[in-house]
């Protein structure tokens, strides 16, 4: 059963065995595996591995989408990447970016390999795209731009060339 931590906006699994299983599968904040980001909590509830204590998944998604306009799109992108077997970690402060780790053994021991920028709707403008490339370059990550609709997100890998 997922219990919300008051004021933090994070969730904790009440069952110790499930909490351990989720941490092994790459869920939870780094260093605090027992705390789940709302995207992770919603994904686990969607996959029927757990449930929310005081609400259904649909009620949670509706409430989270009211708080954060990007949440519904972020949840769809997060779910698609996670279903491909990749570990995805949202940033705790912003739902605009997701960190994606390389597939395979030891994937959590290394740093993320890709930065997914969420840009629902049309492809981002040149100016905003330049900013996203700069952010990814500073973090030394590959940039993936997720845009389109919630029903059909599209992914674009963006590279910067220096001469």
Image (cartoon, rainbow, N blue to C red):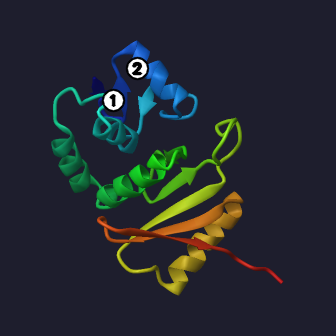
* Image location (x, y in percent) of residue 47: 32, 38
**Depth order, front residue of 139/7:** 139
Mark 1 sits on what residue? 49
* Image location (x, y in percent) of residue 32: 52, 27
Q: Residue at x 69, y 66 (%)?
A: 137
- Give the secondary structure at mark 2: helix
- Give the secondary structure at mark 1: loop
Q: Quadrant of the N terminus?
A: top left
Indicate whether 98 appears above or below 19.
below
Is residue 63 visible in this depiction of the protein?
A: yes
Mark 2 sits on what residue? 18
Indicate whether 151 appears above or below 77.
below
Q: Residues within 10 Å of mark 1 (few under 14, many from 20)?
A: few
Quarter of the image where one finds residue 108: top right
- CB-based contact (under 8 Å), mark 1 and mark 2: yes
Indicate whether 61 appears above or below 133.
above
Q: Residue at x 43, y 21 (%)?
A: 19
User: Looking at the image, is mark 1 or mark 2 earlier in the sequence?
Assistant: 2
Q: Quadrant of the C terminus?
A: bottom right
Indicate whether 90 appears above or below 20.
below
Side of 67 where 8 appears, left or right: right
**Depth order, front residue of 107/41:** 107
Is residue 32 visible in this depiction of the protein?
A: no
Q: Residue at x 57, y 71 (%)?
A: 132
* Image location (x, y in percent) of residue 85: 52, 45
* Image location (x, y in percent) of residue 52: 24, 30
Quarter of the image where one finds residue 138: bottom right
């Amino acid at each position: 059963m997922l219990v919300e931590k008051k004021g933090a906006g994070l969730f904790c699994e009440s069952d110790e065995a499930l909490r351990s299983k989720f941490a092994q599968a790459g869920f939870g904040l780094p260093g605090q595996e027992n705390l789940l980001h709302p995207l992770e909590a919603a994904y686990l509830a969607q996959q029927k591995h757990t449930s929310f204590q005081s609400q259904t998944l649909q009620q949670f998604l509706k409430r989270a989408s009211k708080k954060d306009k990007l949440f519904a799109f972020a949840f769809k992108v997060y779910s698609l990447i996670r279903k491909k077997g990749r570990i995805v970690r949202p940033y705790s402060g912003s739902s605009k970016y997701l960190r994606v780790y390389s597939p395979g053994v030891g994937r959590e021991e290394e740093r993320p390999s890709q930065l997914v920028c969420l840009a629902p709707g049309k492809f981002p403008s040149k100016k905003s795209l330049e900013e996203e490339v700069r952010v990814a370059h500073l973090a030394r990550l590959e940039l993936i731009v997720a845009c389109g609709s919630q029903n059909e997100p599209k992914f674009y890998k963006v590279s910067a060339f220096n001469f």
